[in-house]
């Protein structure tokens, strides 16, 4: 669920980034101050992650739904105890 939350927050942040960059005047304006290095770095970062994070969120949610379905369906079957046993905790 943490992965899904991180992907969704990234998608929401990307939407805000697009809205903010539309407020900035075009590069054709001769009086415009050039973009800072941080702004250009963030632009490249968000462009790279935009097409990767949205489908990843869907696949992680589908995998989580599948695991939940298998756990509920096979809750009383001792053959499938490994599905509901915690691996990283006690």
Image (cartoon, rainbow, N blue to C red):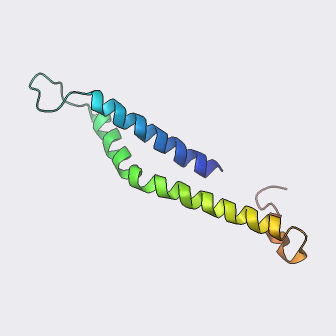
Locate residue 75, reporting x and y percent. 86, 67
Q: Is residue 57 above or below residue 45?
A: below
**Residue at 85% of width from left, 56% of height from top?**
90
Quadrant in which residue 29 is drawn: top left
How many numbered circles does the render carry? 0
Q: Is residue 38 above or below residue 44?
A: above
For the residue pair 16 and 86, the one nearer the viewer reads as 16
**Residue at the extreme bottom:** 79
For the residue pair 27 and 36, the one nearer the viewer reads as 27
**Residue at 36% of width from left, 51% of height from top?**
48
- Image side of residue 19 versus residue 59, left or right: left
**Residue at 45% of width from left, 38% of height from top?**
13
**Residue at the extreme left:** 30
Quadrant in which residue 14 is drawn: top left
**Residue at 63% of width from left, 63% of height from top?**
63
Locate residue 35, reporting x and y percent. 23, 31
Locate residue 60, reporting x and y percent. 59, 59
Locate residue 86, reporting x and y percent. 80, 60
């Amino acid at each position: 669920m943490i992965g899904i939350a991180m992907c969704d927050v990234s998608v929401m942040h990307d939407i805000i980034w697009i809205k903010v960059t539309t407020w900035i005047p075009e590069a054709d304006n001769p009086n415009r101050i050039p973009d800072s290095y941080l702004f250009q770095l963030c632009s490249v970062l968000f462009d790279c992650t935009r097409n990767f994070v949205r489908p990843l969120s869907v696949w992680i949610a589908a995998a989580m739904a599948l695991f939940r379905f298998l756990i509920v369906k096979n809750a009383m079957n001792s053959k499938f105890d490994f599905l509901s046993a915690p691996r990283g905790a006690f």
